[in-house]
Structures are given as C-alpha cells and as structure tokens.
Image (cartoon, rainbow, N blue to C red):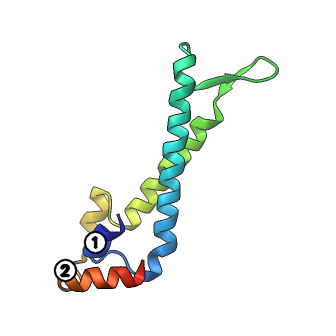
C-alpha cells in the first residue's frame, strides 16, 4: 500500500502515523470478521451476530460493533489517502519524479 501511495505522490514521511492507523484498523476489521465467521459456523440461528448474556437475554455480539467501527475507521483513513472514489475526485497529486527517484526516497522514508 505504501509503495502505491508514494508513487502517486500521496504519501510522505509525515504520513506514517495515519498509514499505521489505517493498517491497524484494517487488521482489526479482518480479525473481527474472521472471529464472527468462526462463531457463525457454530450458531445457525443468528450466525454469531447475537449472543446471550448471563441473564439469558439476547444482545448484539460485541464483535459486530468492533467490526463495524473498524470498517468505518478503514474507510475514513482510506479517504484521507485518496483510496475511495470520492476522495480521488478531490485529490490533485501526481508521481514524485522518476520511478528510480521514488524507490530510493521510499526506502529512505519507510
């Protein structure tokens, strides 16, 4: 992801934290969805989307909220880097010189 963003002129050294946050949100989203999928295999009624409390009440599985929040964070950070159609329409960035220059600068920053 970093190589592609850098080649497009959308990533610099100061963007590390935002890129790291994007990557972590993406990882959290994938983990939550994988956990929900495993639960869905055992729960034919609600596919893991609901769980029972200790009192026997059915509530939304907290993993659903985790997955939803992480997904929203991914889209938010993706938008910051122009990785959504609407964001690309607003961004006017181009490659940072020749490909060789890009590669050497990328190694220096990342």
Q: Residue at x 53, y 57 (%)?
A: 24
Residue that appears at 57% across and 35% down = 64
Give the residue drawn at x 52%, y 72%: 17
Q: Is residue 34 left or right of residue 105?
A: right
In the visual, does 47 lie left or right of 80?
A: right
Q: Could you tell whether 55 is left or right of 71 in the image?
A: right
Q: Is residue 12 above or below residue 54?
A: below
Please state the horizontal and vertical placement of residue 43, each as a whole percent of the image: 57, 17
- Which residue is most to the top? 45
Q: Nearer the viewer, mark 2 or mark 1?
A: 2
Farthest residue toward the left? 98
Picture residue at 39% right of the left edge, 80% below the top: 12
User: Can I make out residue 52 in this image?
Assistant: yes
- Against 68, is 105 above or below? below
The reply, left or right, for residue 48 in relation to residue 23 is right
| Quadrant location, the C terminus | bottom left
The local secondary structure at tag 2 comes to helix
Residue tagged by mark 1?
A: 91
Read off the residue under disc 2.
99
Residue neighbourhood size for the residue with mark 1, other residues' Cα within 10 Å, grouped as few (<14), some (14–19), many (≥20): few
**Closer to us: 6 or 58:** 6
Residue 33 position within the rendered picture, expressed as x and y whole percent measured from the top left: 50, 37
Label 2 to label 1, Cα distance in Å?
A: 21 Å
Q: Earlier in the sequence, mark 2 or mark 1?
A: 1
From this view, report whether residue 75 is shown above or below residue 33. Answer: below
Q: Secondary structure at mark 1?
A: loop
């Amino acid at each position: 992801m970093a190589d592609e963003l850098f080649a497009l002129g959308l990533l610099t050294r100061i963007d590390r934290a935002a890129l790291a946050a994007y990557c972590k949100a993406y990882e959290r989203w994938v983990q939550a969805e994988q956990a929900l999928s495993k639960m869905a295999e055992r729960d034919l009624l609600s596919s893991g989307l609901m769980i029972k409390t200790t009192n026997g009440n059915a509530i939304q599985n907290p993993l659903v909220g985790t997955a939803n929040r992480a997904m929203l964070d991914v889209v938010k950070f993706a938008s910051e880097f122009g990785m959504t159609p609407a964001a690309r329409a607003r961004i006017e960035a181009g490659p940072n010189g020749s490909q060789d220059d890009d590669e050497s600068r990328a190694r220096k920053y990342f």
